[in-house]
Amino acid sequence: MRRPALLEPFANGNFSLYFSGQVISHTGMWFQNLALSLVVLEVTGSAQALSGVTIAQFLPLLLFSVPAGWVADRFSPRSIMLTTSLTSAGIAAVLALVTGADAPRLDVIYALVAALGTVSTFERIAAQAIIFELVGGAGLTRAVSISTIALASARSIGPGLAGIAFQGIGAMTCMLLNSVAYLLVFVSIFLLRRSRFHARVTGSPPDSVGRRRSPMRGNRPFAVLLIVNVVVALLSLNLMLVLTATVTLTFVGDATATGAVHALNAVGAIIGGLVGASLVRVRVRSLILACAGLGLALLANAAAPTLPLFLMLAPLLGLAVGYYHSVLQAAAQSSVPPELIGRAMSLVTMGNYGMAPIGALLMGWVIDASSGRVAMLLGSLGAFAATVIVSVALRARPGER
């Protein structure tokens, strides 16, 4: 029986190993993130204090994404990922010891999370740059879309299990599981067969007038994609903070309910990622539908009056988020030549995750001043604004990517 087209990347043994490692990695991170969020909320009862974890985790992405892209375009992404996975395992183990203390110090937690975020910046960019080497140019778009499902799959597994684990065996064990996950990622990357890699030009020369090549120069659609990415990341995608605070503070739910809302959200994200992966061609203009859908889903969740209804609507929001991420990543990589993928994805990552610290401060303030519903309403307006930006900016040249 012929394999369905959207699952073709899994016929590649290297890609299957890579995908498995990414699912393990992101599952471990969700164990850590949920445990940290609940610990901070238990100690402080403040969404703004919780935003400090987000700031520490993602500020390094804002500062180091561009250097990480330069590194990924000049050195082997496989070697980078081997180094970062081992380093992250060590940092996560130390974080487990600190979190397991009777009175965990927030300043030490923030410092360790920032260190882990710095290492993760180089890992994230390398993990995106290696996809071309695994599948080549012909299978790139579908493989990139499929790879976003690794994050969604982890979100469907991690939060629910982490919520149960937090109540049953404590935050320290959740952190140790994340450390073990990084070690398993190291094994998955080590087992990749380099003889089957597709060659990708690295260290590309300057252009005809001696300027250093940039993925944005002369590439209007990609520049529009970056603008939209910043707007949506800033206002619409602080879901770890917004969903956790809404369940915990607005609906007074427990750790199990918090894990459930993230898990249900992730189930929808898997479906959204699969829908995105089924598209034959993805362009920057495809973000019009993706952003509009995200805006509608956030609006529906913001209107939920009770916790049971909020849980029922969580998969709808997840579907919109998964589809948006799938389209964004595929459109970004297909809009630039292979030798610029590392630098291009560093800019996407800087916008997608680098805005998280600013968005966390904003959403933490909004939630403390009003509620999680208002934060989701603001996110909905941001997604609709992004829809307008793509529609207007690319209207003059509808044939562009």
Image (cartoon, rainbow, N blue to C red):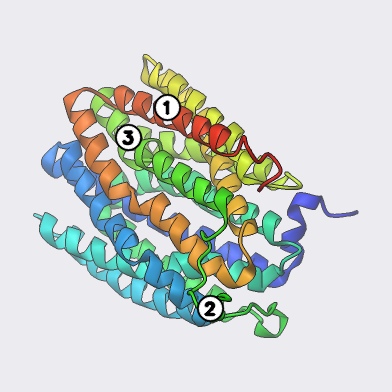
Whichever of callouts 2 and 1 sits on the residue coming sooner in the sequence is 2
User: Which mark is nearer the camera, 2 or 1?
Assistant: 2
Q: Which residue is found at the position 37% from the left and 21% from the top? A: 307
**Front: mark 2 or 3:** 2
- Dot 2: few (<14), some (14–19), or many (≥20) neighbours within 10 Å? few
Q: Position of residue 101 (x, y in %)?
A: 13, 59
* 317 with respect to 68 (left or right): right
Residue 183 lies, in percent from the top left, at 44, 73
Q: Secondary structure at mark 3?
A: helix
Q: Which residue extends farthest front?
A: 209
Q: Residue furthest bottom?
A: 195
- Along the viewing direction, whichever of 376 and 315 lies nearer the viewer: 376
- Give me the C-alpha separation between circle 2 and circle 1: 41 Å
Image marks 2 and 1: residues in contact by CB distance under 8 Å = no
- Per the image, the residue denoted by label 1 is 380
Q: Is residue 100 visible?
A: no
Earlier along the polypeptide chain: callout 3 or callout 1? 3
Among the two numbered marks 2 and 3 on one chain, the one whose residue lies closer to the N terminus: 2
Is disc 2 in contact with disc 3, using a CB cutoff of under 8 Å? no
Task: Find disc 3 in the rendering and name its residue.
Answer: 242
- Considering only vertical position in the picture, is 9 above or below 227? below
| Amino acid found under the numbered disc labelled 2 | Pro
Q: Residues within 10 Å of mark 1 (few under 14, many from 20)?
A: many
The amino acid beneath tag 3 is Val
The residue that label 2 is drawn on is 206
